Image (cartoon, rainbow, N blue to C red):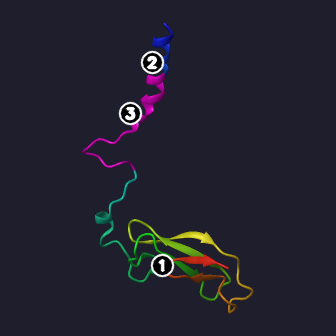
Amino acid sequence: MQLINKFMALALLLAPLALAAPTNDASPAGAVSAASIVGTVSVDDPSTLGCKPGAYACRCGWGGKECWLEVCNALGRWQTSANCRDRSSPNGPETCRNGPNDTAYCI
C-alpha cells in the first residue's frame, strides 16, 4: 500500500512537467525566432543594431546623468543588464567602462 501511495505522489509531482513539455511541431508560447524579426528592426534605433551574443557594453544617456550596462542577447540585440550610479552632471565622467574582450563594468 505504501509503495502505491509513493508511486501516485511521484506521478502527481511529475505530471506538470509532462504537460508543459513542447511538442515537436509547435514552438513554446512566447518564443521568437530570429527569422520572425527580420525586416522589423529600425536602423535608427541603436539598441537594435547587430551585436555578438554575450558581449557587454557601457552606455550613458546623451545629455543625462544615467549610465548603464547592456548585454547582447541571443537574438543579437542589446538589452539593459545593470544600472550604474548616476554621473555628477550631464557632462561629468561616465560611471561605467568598456573592458577587454567585450566586457563592461560600473565604477
Q: Position of residue 88 (x, y in %)?
A: 75, 86
Q: Position of residue 78 (x, y in %)?
A: 47, 73
Identify the residue shown where x is 51% and y is 82%: 100
C-alpha span from label 1 to label 3: 39 Å
Pick the quarter of the image with the C terminus: bottom right
Identify the residue shown where x is 48% and y is 27%: 13
C-alpha span from label 1 to label 2: 50 Å
The amino acid beneath tag 1 is Asp
| Residue 98 relative to residue 29: left or right | right
| Residue 60 relative to residue 39: left or right | right
Relative to 28, residue 80 above or below: below
Residue 102 numbered mark, or none: 1
State which region is magenta. Answer: 10-29
Q: Position of residue 82 (x, y in %)?
A: 60, 69
| Residue 58 relative to residue 48: left or right | right
Identify the residue shown where x is 71% and y is 84%: 87
Q: Which element type, helix, strand or loop, lies under badge 3? A: helix
Which is more toward the observer, 106 or 44? Answer: 106
C-alpha span from label 3 to label 2: 16 Å
Kindly identify which residue carries mark 3.
18
Residue 7 numbered mark, or none: 2
Identify the residue shown where x is 49% and y is 20%: 9
For label 3, the crowd category at 10 Å Cα-Cα, with few meaning under 14, some 14 to 19 and many 20 or more, is: few
